[in-house]
Structure formats: structure tokens, C-alpha cells
Image: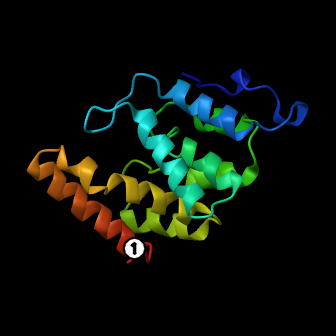
């Protein structure tokens, strides 16, 4: 796992990471993680990135999609993200969609809405999380809980 800013050379001293490099990094730092259904976590990241691309997202938004759970899941630290060779907009979106312990869902939604580009990333994340095929493999109580959770977040974000 990448945890410290010193693992990422000074971003001013080198070019920004390409989307292919961001995807490879995301796959590497989430190596061994699985989703609630036991699937490799990288499948979720790829689906969210594809969802952002299909919705007309920018390169910065696609990069944020690949990294949208990296800080929250502890795959990288906030300090690493701060020093990473990434566009500032990408960093802001990743931090916007990073849930904070104990944070009310309304504050989380407000931060997403206040951060340019973050809503599209979260929309693609919610769409993949709420995919009926993904939810179908979960037990009924978990499926009901997550369905309600995702619907509430969509409503708070004005996604209908």
C-alpha cells in the first residue's frame, strides 16, 4: 500500500500521472480487497471509472473515479494524495467523496455538491453500488439496507 507522501516524487518535478498510471495505481493499492459480494475491489473501481467516462466525465473525473475510495479505505493516506502527481481537481474530488468517520450524511452530500466534478463521480459510484445484479448476491437484510442507503444519498444529491 502507498501511505506516505515521500513515496510519490514531488509533483512539480515530474509530469502528472496518466489515466493508465492512475488505474494501475488504484488496482495495486486495492490489491487483495474485495467488495461486499467477495469480488475483487478493482472491478468496482473500473466500473465507476467507466461510468464516469460514459457520462461524459473529464480526465480529472475519471482519475478521481479510480481513486474514489482510496483514502476512505486506507489504501493511500491523505498526505500521499496531497503530494501525488495528480491534477488539483482530481484531488479535491477524491477528498469530497471520501466519507469521514461520524460525519452526517447531509454534510457528506453537501461537500460533494460543493466540489466541482464530484457529483458525477458519486453518481457513477452509486449507480454501480445499486446495480441490481450486484445487490442480488447479497443477503436480503443487507440488500434492503444498502438499497435504502443509496436511495437516500441519491435524493440528497438531487439525482432522483
* Front position in the image: 7 or 135: 135
Q: Is residue 14 left or right of residue 109?
A: right
Residue at the (61%, 29%) spot, across then down: 25
Q: Can the viewer see residue 71 in this picture?
A: yes
Residue 72: where, in percent of width, then height? 46, 41
Q: Is residue 55 left or right of residue 137?
A: right
| 30 shown above or below 157 | above
| 87 shown above or below 150 | above
Residue 116: where, in percent of width, then height? 65, 66
Q: Is residue 3 left or right of residue 6?
A: left
Residue at the (32%, 37%) spot, across then down: 35
Q: Can the viewer see residue 103 in this picture?
A: no
Q: Quadrant of the N terminus?
A: top right
Residue 9: where, in percent of width, then height? 79, 25
Q: Is residue 84 left or right of residue 115?
A: right
| Residue at image mark 1 | 156
Amino acid at each position: 500500500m502507498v501511505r506516505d507522501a515521500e513515496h510519490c516524487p514531488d509533483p512539480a518535478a515530474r509530469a502528472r500521472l496518466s489515466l493508465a498510471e492512475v488505474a494501475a495505481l488504484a488496482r495495486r493499492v486495492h490489491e487483495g480487497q474485495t467488495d461486499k459480494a467477495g469480488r475483487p475491489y478493482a472491478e468496482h473501481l473500473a466500473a465507476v471509472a467507466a461510468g464516469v467516462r460514459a457520462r461524459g466525465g473529464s480526465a480529472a473525473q475519471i482519475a478521481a473515479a479510480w481513486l474514489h475510495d482510496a483514502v476512505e479505505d486506507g489504501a493511500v493516506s491523505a498526505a500521499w494524495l496531497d503530494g501525488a502527481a495528480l491534477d488539483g481537481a482530481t484531488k479535491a474530488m477524491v477528498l469530497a467523496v471520501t466519507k469521514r468517520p461520524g460525519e452526517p450524511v447531509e454534510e457528506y452530500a453537501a461537500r460533494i455538491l460543493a466540489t466541482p466534478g464530484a457529483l458525477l463521480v458519486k453518481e457513477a459510484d452509486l449507480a454501480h453500488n445499486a446495480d441490481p445484479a450486484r445487490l442480488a448476491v447479497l443477503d436480503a437484510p443487507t440488500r434492503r439496507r444498502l438499497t435504502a442507503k443509496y436511495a437516500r444519498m441519491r435524493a440528497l444529491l438531487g439525482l432522483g
